[in-house]
Amino acid sequence: MPSVMGLLEERERAARQRVEALQVELREAEAVWERFVIARQTVAEVLAEPAAGEEAPLAGMVGERPARAAGALPGSVVPAWREGLAPDVLAPDYRRLMDVLAQSGEAMDCRRLAAAVGLEAVAAKVEGVRSKAKRLVARGWLVEERPGMFSVPAGRGGDS
């Protein structure tokens, strides 16, 4: 008769393998999704640029910036935040960081943020999260209240 501990270990091992398989599938699906986000942003940038020899269209209101100036930087998957821009324009990894911070309602350091999005709290993963968080700060989506402590300002949450 098998031991109870042996049965539990076997089931734990099967559950861990299932979780690992689902995580691989999730990463692959997110990569596909991110390619579509980048493609959509690239097409929007191309369509916003004037054709060769044409002048750029004038903004509709005095003081209004052209759409391209307010949007993504060339080659970027993080557009600059502006009023009315929802977090769903962000690539999946950035959106996940926004969602976690918006739901927590408090500032988080990168180690805690990495764990909250399901990453191991190892140096490489934490630094990847830090890089993304800093990019979100630079583009106006997040604030860095104190060095290394990130949060979502009011009105920029992940509740789109």
Image (cartoon, rainbow, N blue to C red):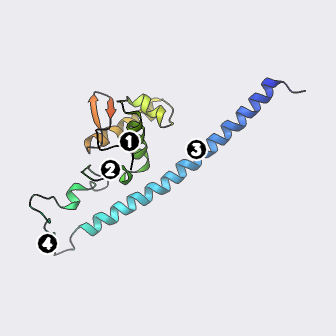
Q: Point out residue 50 in the picture as x, y percentages from the top left corner.
A: 20, 71
Q: CA distance from mark 3 to mark 2?
A: 24 Å
Q: Residues within 10 Å of mark 2 (few under 14, many from 20)?
A: many
Q: Nearer the viewer, residue 34 or 128?
A: 34
Q: Which residue is mark 2?
A: 78
Displayed quadrant of residue 58: bottom left
User: In the drawing, what numbered circle is on residue 55?
Assistant: 4
Please name the residue shown 8% across and 61% down the image.
62
Q: Foreground mark, 1 or 3?
A: 1
Contact (Cβ within 8 Å) of mark 3 with mark 2 = no
Residue lying furthest left: 62
Q: Is residue 123 above or below residue 46?
A: above
Callout 1, which amino acid?
Answer: Met
Q: CA distance from mark 1 to mark 3?
A: 20 Å
Of labels 4 and 3, earlier in sequence is 3
Q: Point out residue 79 in the picture as x, y percentages from the top left corner.
A: 29, 52
Contact (Cβ within 8 Å) of mark 4 with mark 3 = no
Q: Left or right of 28: which side holds 91?
A: left
Of labels 2 and 1, earlier in sequence is 2
User: In the drawing, what numbered circle is on residue 23?
Assistant: 3
Q: Which residue is mark 1?
A: 98
Task: Label 1, secondary structure: give it.
Answer: helix
Q: CA distance from mark 4 to mark 3?
A: 48 Å
